Image: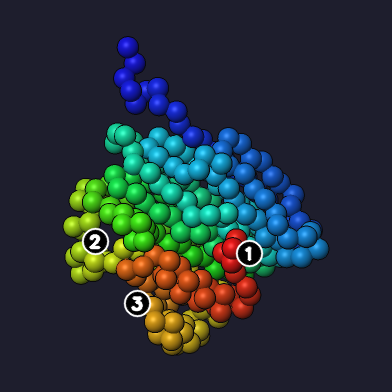
C-alpha cells in the first residue's frame, strides 16, 4: 500500500513570459499558473500572475520566468496574496522566480504578500539578472499568520533566497531562513523582535545611492519600522511590523513613491 504522502495531490504551475516594447512576445503557462493583462495594450504593460490552486502546500511547485527585452517596461504583480498552508510532511512548497532584464529595461516586481500558516514549509529562490543600464524595483512581504484571524505560526520552515547579478557580477545575495519553533525564533531581537511580518524592497537604478536619505525620511514619515542602506548600485530597505496589512500599505506607498507611478490595480482592489 502506498504511503499517504505519495498519493496526496500536488499542484504544479509554470509561467514563461517575455515582454517587449511592443507588448508580449513569449507566453507559456501550464498547470495551476496563469497570467492576465488588465490594462489595454496601448498602456504600459501590467501582468497579473494567478495560482488557480488557491495556495501552496508541501510538495507543490511553482516556476516563474520573466524576461524583458531591450527598453521594455512592465509591472508584474499577483492577483492576491499567496497562501502557504500546512505541509503534511517535511517536503516544502517550492517556488522558483527568474527575472531577466536586458539593456534599458525596467521592471516593477510587486507581488502581493506571502502568508504562511502554522506548520507551513516554503522554499523559494529568486534569481535576478540585469544588464548594466537596466533598472528594477522589487518588493516581497512575508506574513506569519493573519493577526485579524487570530492565527499563530508556532512551527514551520522558511527558506527565502535572493541573488541579483548586474552586468554579470553578483551585487546582492540574501537568505532568510527559519526552521522549527518559528514563533520562538521570531521573538529574538536578532530576527524580527516579535513582529509578525517582514518586507524586503530592492531598488536597482543609476540613482539608487543618491536617493538613500530621501527613502529614510519617507519610511519615517510612513511610520514604518524600517532601515535602508545602499551599496553596489542598489538600495535595500528592510521593514518589520506587527500588522501584516499595515506593513503592506506602508511598503506599497514607499514603492509607489520611489517608482513614481501608481501601484498595480490588483493592490488597489
User: Residue 96 appears at what percent x and percent y?
Assistant: 48, 46
Category of crowding for the residue at label 1, using alpha-carbon neighbours closer than 10 angstroms: few (below 14), some (14–19), many (at least 20): few
Which corner quadrant of the image does residue 152 belong to?
bottom left
**Secondary-structure class at tag 1:** helix
Q: How far separated are the C-alphas under marks 1 and 3?
A: 26 Å
Comes first in the chain, label 1 or label 3: 3
| Residue 265 tag number | 1
Give the residue drawn at x 70%, y 54%: 37
Query: Can residue 188 be seen at all in this image of the molecule?
Result: yes
Query: Can residue 167 be seen at all in this image of the molecule?
Result: no
Q: How far separated are the C-alphas under marks 2 and 1?
A: 32 Å
Give the residue drawn at x 40%, y 85%: 220
Residue denoted by label 2 = 186
Give the residue drawn at x 34%, y 77%: 225
Residue denoted by label 3 = 225
Which residue is at the far front?
Answer: 149
Q: Nearer the viewer, mark 1 or mark 3?
A: 1
Q: Is residue 17 left or right of residue 242?
A: right
Q: How far separated are the C-alphas under marks 3 and 2?
A: 15 Å
Comes first in the chain, label 3 or label 2: 2
Amino acid at each position: 500500500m502506498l504511503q499517504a504522502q505519495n498519493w496526496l495531490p500536488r499542484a504544479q504551475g509554470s509561467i514563461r513570459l517575455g515582454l517587449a516594447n511592443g507588448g508580449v512576445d513569449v507566453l507559456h503557462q501550464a498547470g495551476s499558473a496563469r497570467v492576465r493583462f488588465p490594462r489595454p495594450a496601448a498602456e504600459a504593460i501590467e501582468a497579473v500572475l494567478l495560482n488557480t490552486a488557491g495556495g501552496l502546500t508541501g510538495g507543490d511547485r511553482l516556476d516563474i520566468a520573466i524576461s524583458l527585452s531591450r527598453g521594455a517596461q512592465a509591472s508584474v504583480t499577483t492577483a492576491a496574496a499567496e497562501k502557504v498552508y500546512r505541509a503534511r510532511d517535511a517536503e516544502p512548497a517550492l517556488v522558483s522566480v527568474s527575472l531577466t532584464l536586458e539593456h534599458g529595461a525596467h521592471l516593477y516586481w510587486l507581488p502581493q504578500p506571502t502568508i504562511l500558516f502554522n506548520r507551513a514549509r516554503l522554499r523559494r529562490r529568486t534569481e535576478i539578472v540585469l544588464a548594466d543600464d537596466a533598472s528594477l524595483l522589487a518588493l516581497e512581504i512575508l506574513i506569519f499568520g493573519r493577526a485579524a484571524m487570530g492565527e499563530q505560526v508556532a512551527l514551520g520552515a522558511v527558506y527565502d533566497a535572493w541573488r541579483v547579478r548586474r552586468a554579470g557580477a553578483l551585487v546582492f545575495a540574501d537568505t532568510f531562513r527559519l526552521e522549527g519553533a518559528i514563533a520562538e525564533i521570531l521573538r529574538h531581537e536578532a530576527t524580527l523582535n516579535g513582529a509578525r511580518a517582514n518586507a524586503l524592497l530592492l531598488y536597482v537604478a543609476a540613482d539608487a545611492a543618491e536617493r538613500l536619505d530621501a527613502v529614510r525620511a519617507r519610511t519615517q514619515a510612513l511610520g514604518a519600522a524600517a532601515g535602508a542602506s545602499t551599496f553596489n548600485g542598489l538600495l535595500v530597505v528592510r521593514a518589520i511590523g506587527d500588522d501584516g496589512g499595515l506593513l503592506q500599505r506602508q511598503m506599497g506607498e514607499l514603492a509607489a513613491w520611489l517608482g513614481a507611478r501608481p501601484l498595480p490595480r490588483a493592490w488597489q482592489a
